[in-house]
Image: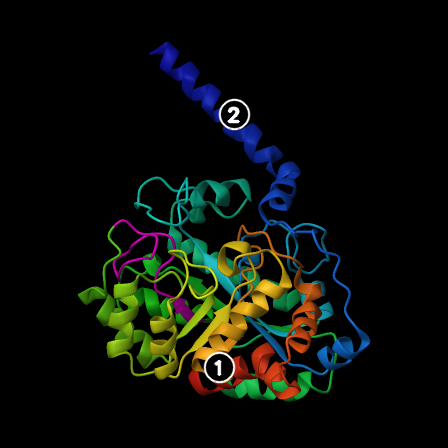
Amino acid sequence: MIIIVKILIAIAVLLIVIYASSPLYLQAVEKRINRIDGAEDYKASKNSKDLHSTLFIIDLHCDSLLSYRNLLQRSSAGHSDIPRLVEGNIGLQVFGAATLIPLFPDMEKNDTGLGIAGFLAFLKHWPLNTWFSPKNRALYQGSKLHNLEDKSKGALEIIKTSNQLENYYKRYMEKTHITAGLLALEGAHVINSIPGDIDELFDQGFRIIGLTHLTDNKLGGSRHGAQKGGLTEFGKNALRRMEKLEMIIDLTHASSKLTEDVLNICSRPVMVSHTGVKGCMNNNRNLSDRQIQAIAENGGLIGIGFWKEAVGKSNVEAIVNSIKHTSDLVGIKHVALGSDFDGGVSVPFDAAGMVHITEELMRQGFSEREIRMIMGENALNFLINSLPKQ
């Protein structure tokens, strides 16, 4: 008995030491997992800078709310914060809230066993109720964004309705040094009751729901899950509630069967916020041409990612190649940007360097009108038509 008590005391002391010292190494760890690939020294031309400064840019996904950093301050760690969003001329950033992460994530197959999200919440000094509850981790990340808005002195506005977005867009085009955020849930495993959990997320400001993330859940199968199944009866009921609230369905990470099932019953256009395409990088993570066409037929939107596993290489040319493949297949109006900044990936530039996409689109022969659509107008029109009016 004495030995057991000593072991428990030793474990408690170790956890206290880890908890107290975690801020010292969290940013160092983030620099390692959210890298900027410096293999190429990108230089933007005056023409691309001039055009870029007139764009309204939307990025459909980042994971910056997971960061321990103060996102109101410019950092050398990670990919994104409010100052770098403003510097990159990003008018609207969709902030994803990931809440369930396998201990050893695999792009092919993950079970729903041991995860590390609760331990990460502990290390980041998040509230105690987030250590054991995925839903509380989602709600806490939502509250983090609202706190950033409150402290930003007008630099950040959280968008919840289409009317608000239209008004913000008009203001943005007349004013510099501001940006906006929109809350998205990455993985609906936090939903265990209908309508309770869905309504609670909506009330917190979540407007986009990614049905799956790295594992299967009660709603359906993940591309990376053990079963990779379709939409469950629970999932169908959840989908009906989301559509009634005019929440946007995100099929990123959804299994092929889940994607097919949702497109068959969904009455509103869907999005895939951050992805690659098999036509440029053939792996389990990316969309096939047939899936791209089905999403476009639904009126949907596809956000092209920036990281190597999505587009084949960690450079700007590969990103634009995937944009071109998608636009050639289904038309410019279905293509958008979905960086996955701060998502545990390596990218060729951070949020401040978005001008390099504009530069490469110009180099590959896209017209000014097409560049405006890809960089943000497609996503703007999609969101205005999809978000609740009031």
Return the mark for residue 238.
none
Q: Residue furthest top?
A: 2
The residue drawn where x is 26% and y is 61% is 220
Q: Which residue is the site of mark 2?
A: 14
Q: Amino acid at mark 2?
A: Leu
Q: Position of residue 128 (x, y in %)?
A: 46, 45
Picture quadrant where residue 178 is located = bottom right
Say if 56 sits above or below 16 in the image: below
The magenta segment: 207-226
Say if 257 sits above or below 302 in the image: above
Q: Residues within 10 Å of mark 2 (few under 14, many from 20)?
A: few
One can see residue 353 in this view: yes
Q: Position of residue 174 (x, y in %)?
A: 73, 87
Q: Amino acid at mark 1?
A: Leu
Judge whether residue 236 is colored magenta.
Answer: no
Disc 1 is placed on an element classified as helix
| Quadrant of the frame with the N terminus | top left
Sequence-wise, the earlier of marks 2 and 1 is: 2
Disc 2 is placed on an element classified as helix
Q: Which residue is the site of mark 1?
A: 383
One can see residue 388 in this view: no
